[in-house]
Amino acid sequence: MDWNYHRTSHNTSEQIPMIKSFPKNATVFTSNGQRVIQPLFCKEHREIGDWFIELNAPLEFQSYLEHDMIIVVATKEKGNQPFRIKNPKVTSKVEVKAFHIGFDSANHAVELSTVTNANCTTALTTLLTNTEDTTNFTVYSDITTLKTFSVVNLSLYDALRQIADEYNGVLDFDGWQIRITANIGADNGVVLAYGKNIQESEITENWDLVVTKLKPIGNDGILLTPEWLTADVSYDRPYTKIMTFDSDNVSNLALVAQLYLDRYKVPRVNYKVKADVEQNVALGDAVVVKARQFTTSAEVLSYDYNPISQRVIAVEFGNFRPTLKNFFSEMTQAVEEKAVKKAQLKIDDMAGEIEAYADNKIELAVGTAIGGQDSILPYTQDTWEVGGLDVSTGGTVSNSEYLRTKTTGLVSPSIDIVLTCSSLIDPTTTAILFYTSANAFISAFSFTGRERKITTPSNAYYFKVRARKSAGGTFNLSEMPSHWVRVTPIQKYLKGARYEFTDTNFAIKNNLGDTVLTADIAGNLEMIGKVTATSGKIGRFDISGDDLVYTSDLFNKEYDYSDISKLRRILAGLDTPTDYENEVYDTNNSGTLTITDLSQIVAYVESGTPLPTPRRQIRSVIRIGTTSGEIKTTAVSAGGHTGQTFVMKADKLTGELIDVKILSAKDVVLNGESIMTNGTWSPTVIGTTTAGTGTYLAQVGKYTKIGRKVNFDIQLTWTAHTGTGNMEVTLPFNNGDSWSPVVVIPSSLTYANQLGAMCVPNVARIRFYTFASNIAFTAGLTLDTSASVFISGSYMV
């Protein structure tokens, strides 16, 4: 779905979401389903490779929570999603565990599917084509890498896992859509710190692969110069290793070894937080962990979410799982270590990007500054040492008035960073110095003020900082971090765009530097340009595929004459009531529709007599179809039953019940036929033997047709008529199958006894008769050559 926005903004507010039940064979979940479930408990659990709902509900919902039925739940990240129920347990309540519909793929099989030099989307499309039995799945991928491989004798789910493995992607589901993308999650600046928000966590640290000093050896004994690489962290005891790498040249060996050192210079950590849970998290989001001895990057591995309270109730962070369970396989430490050591790197000279591939899909990054956190320059005292830095050469100097960083920090080239310092620091002599990946000095920038924005050099890889006090004199380590210095990245370039953080807002800019989206701390969102989405929310509108869906709050059902007519037909046995009608027309809450309900509604509509309380309530679900051009309004009862739907499309309005005080229309059509029309025709006088013709001085015919009934008026004056036999006059429509009498006022018409006329069955004619008292009217009236008649009557067609 596409919209074009220009400086629109809103404050978001959430409504309590509905949990809806659908039958086992449902494939579309845009309605309210069979029943809206009111749970006693509901929890969404999500992690890579596992996504399910745990739900408890009263027994009244048991028939809507059976095995293989589908429930639709408003999830944390992806809005309404379908989950299939597996083996519900029934005690004093119904206990349900339902897995995302995407895991239906485990019940399909693939004998053989082969692709040659194909991207991920093609591989997925080919896989579905070769899947036994038809599926409802669609596919999406943003990975353009070309691969050649085959899938042989696997379930569809395991085949999807293999494809994700082949393309170094992440498998995910969104409704029926299968997604394999390069990554998931984002960096929202979440920081975990001991003594703060991870103090009461369940904490696991694994130090088995830690290395802080590394001598890498490549193929044929290739060595680096210098031979040893040293990490920028150290511990109470050494972690020194000599390791072999599958690399054929010095340049590649240096890159791979540095990646390995950066990956394993800190232990693998895992935190399960259940108190004071961070709410602004999504699966795969990057977080920064500040432990007692190290700072490392981690990601959101799983979370538990309450869809009713719309709160995260537990979250797991880390850079590994204690059970070593991940999406791809059960790994051992040796497998992980071997995979990273054999990583092959491909350098894109045009884009200046480095891609790392590893057998077990470990994500490796080079020189990426961490955006959105306080600073990439740690505050701790052990980061600093006494002494200065020469801003001309980049070397160290002995000067007790300065503190300098002990080791170099990583920074990305050509990004904007902000240099800030406390009032106790002298900004004019405090400086940041940049170095290449070979540790060659590039340039230095002084802070100059309390805050300065600069762009890092295009070949920057490392940085160091020197700091001096405003008061001058000896700078002691004990004075840190109260004398603080910050180096904060404020923007990155990502797929042709860049984003920027400030203290009050977040902004995205295009390649020209124009701001296209801002979000501030007050919750306001401002966008320019086109926004594409197939799910999510805009205010109280849900984005559902190509539609916008608005669900109102419950309100009292208002009744009118259309409801009276409908209920009369139900009570007369002409219509069978729907679940919706059984609920909303049961005004006396007896559980059955009776004449009492009709009397109460009639009294309410005609005289305003109050209805019994509690009143029946409904809500409106308004669906705006952006591609279909339709606006649909559906009534839904408080019990979740769907009522009538009105559809407005272009110049047409369709629906079931309509209430108006006055209806003015030239033509009213019912079931394809006009139910009320006005018209004229030219009636003629004819003979039954020979019709003949005449000269008409007056020839007027008017009618009103209401449904099957025709009311008409005729005025005729004729001379010199040539017809013979008995007299008849033509009508606008054929009569039905019965005789219908009419009123005739003659003038200069020759007849004996009494004059009468009847509409003849099954033809469009009036036949004239004469009859005497107590005699049947069987004699026709002979046609006069000249006369006048006025006729008025009605008949059923």
Image (spheres, rainbow, N blue to C red):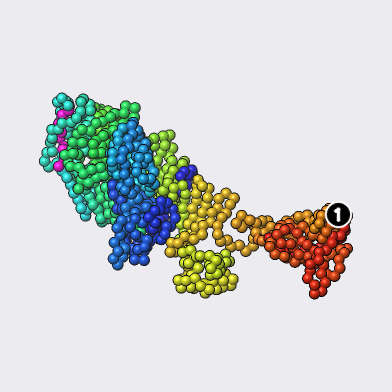
Residue found at the far left of this picture: 237
Q: Which residues are magenta?
A: 208-218
Quick one: 615 or 175, which is closer to the camera? Answer: 175
Q: Taking 745 as reference, is 5 above or below it? A: above
Residue located at (28% from left, 41% from top): 153
Residue 499 appears in which quarter of the rendering? top left
Report which residue position mark 1 lands on. Answer: 722
Name the side, left or right, on which 479 lies relative to 575: left
Quick one: 753 or 539, which is closer to the camera? Answer: 753
Q: Quadrant of the C terminus?
A: bottom right
Residue located at (84% from left, 64% from top): 746
Name the side, left or right, on which 490 lies relative to 584: left
Name the side, left or right, on which 772 lies relative to 736: right
Q: Is residue 511 visible?
A: yes
Helix, strand or loop under label 1: loop
Residue located at (43% from left, 45% from top): 533
Q: Residues within 10 Å of mark 1 (few under 14, many from 20)?
A: some
Q: Is residue 213 magenta?
A: yes
Residue 647 screen position, x and y as percent:
54, 54
Residue 125 appears in which quarter of the rendering? top left
Kind of residue indicated by mark 1: Thr
Quick one: 514 or 380, which is closer to the camera? Answer: 514
